[in-house]
Image (spheres, coloured by chain):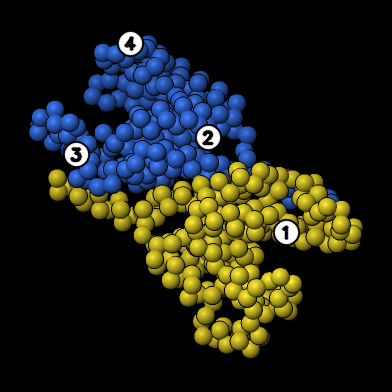
Chain colours: A blue, B yellow
Amino acid sequence: MSNKGLLVVISGFSGVGKGTVVKRLVSEYGYSLSISATTRAPREGEVDGREYYFKSVEEFRNLIDYNGFIEWAQYVDNYYGTPRKFVEQEMAQGHDVILEIEVQGAMNIKKQYKDAVLIFLTAPDANSLRERLAGRGTETEEVIAKRMRRAKEESLDMDVYDYIVVNDDLDACVSTVNSIIVSTKCLKANNLKFMEDIKEELQKQ
Amino acid sequence: MSNKGLLVVISGFSGVGKGTVVKRLVSEYGYSLSISATTRAPREGEVDGREYYFKSVEEFRNLIDYNGFIEWAQYVDNYYGTPRKFVEQEMAQGHDVILEIEVQGAMNIKKQYKDAVLIFLTAPDANSLRERLAGRGTETEEVIAKRMRRAKEESLDMDVYDYIVVNDDLDACVSTVNSIIVSTKCLKANNLKFMEDIKEELQKQ
């Protein structure tokens, strides 16, 4: 009922299907998707402005200096950031914006945007996460072990999030994340003005 | 993801359509509905065990003494209460239970069941509430004025609730309340055990 758009942060274990869930949320429910900027090199098939905005280190640092990001972080020598302009314009127009970012970024968002909703996607248990990370049997044990170590680290940060959603069935997961967004808009804290107005109107009746 | 059912309290302005919303939630989503007990006389068409359990004052007081209600209150010389047995059995079996009760009851529920979710249904504004209360032009101005005074009092209690949902379009309202129930189950606070388990499993991998 609030006119301002909501900021929705989606994180989760590597391999849990975040990207697919986010794509479905955008195509089925019309949410706006924030595209991150990065200094890492594009991988095969990646298009500038679709997967990421690809920037040089100099361009990226310049954007930091000009307050161009609502959050940014450095992972393994590369910078990643969420461009401020798109997010703030969309929210001002009442559009809900989805950010698919890592936990460090999620924490930075929560500090600045108290109304932001933070959602962590998980597999139903560690074994099924391992199965997904193993993929179609094309990965070496070494790669799987490395990914599982990463998942172990990621699990320690789950507490930062407001909601935990199991991606067991894709349709159900997409629908649940949408439910979280819908319900967040009905939270009392997001409707203080509405409540004030209707109370005032009723006093005058 | 928690195995225990959720307690869902639905209140709202008189005339806002609570009863219809609750019926739809039960028939479409399979939620369990708690039937209140009351000492007021049945109205025409009301069936014992469907609208209410109709009790004598003596029976009701006896049930109070035996801890038979999870909450009870007195309005205009009549007692109203939520039978404990049904609610606790359903929740233990993992069923979500809907209570359609007044604000006094809602506050009592929140004190005892911290995980309960409290939802207040409202019209989009005071004028449309007045129109609904006026009904099809069959009510006297006096009756409408009395109902509006009641709405004015009820509006002061909206702050007790977790969520505010506008019942403008019935389908949208039913779907939104369902979204609130779905999302509440994903709240971090309702998944502490799940998070602990997956962290532990990942440590062992």
In-image side of A141 versus A203 (left or right): left
In-image side of A70 versus B162 (left or right): left
Q: Tag 2 or tag 4, which sits nearer the N-term?
A: 2
Which secondary structure, mark 4?
Answer: loop
Q: Nearer the viewer, mark 1 or mark 4?
A: 1
Q: Nearer the viewer, mark 4 or mark 3?
A: 3
B120, above or below A181, in the image = below
| Residue A131 numbered tag | 3
Q: Tag 3 or tag 4, which sits nearer the N-term?
A: 4
Residue lying at the far left in this picture: please name it.
Answer: A141
Instruction: Say whether mark 3 and mark 4 are on the same chain.
Output: yes
Q: x, y (%) of residue B91?
A: 43, 66
Q: Tag 2 or tag 3, which sits nearer the N-term?
A: 2
Which secondary structure, mark 2?
Answer: loop
Disc 2: CA contacts within 10 A as few (<14), some (14-19) or many (>=20): many
For disc 4, the marked residue is A56
- Label 3 marks which chain's residue? A
| Amino acid on which disc 3 is placed | Glu
A66, above or below B21, in the image = above
Disc 3: CA contacts within 10 A as few (<14), some (14-19) or many (>=20): few
For disc 2, the marked residue is A6
Q: x, y (%) of residue B146?
A: 83, 62
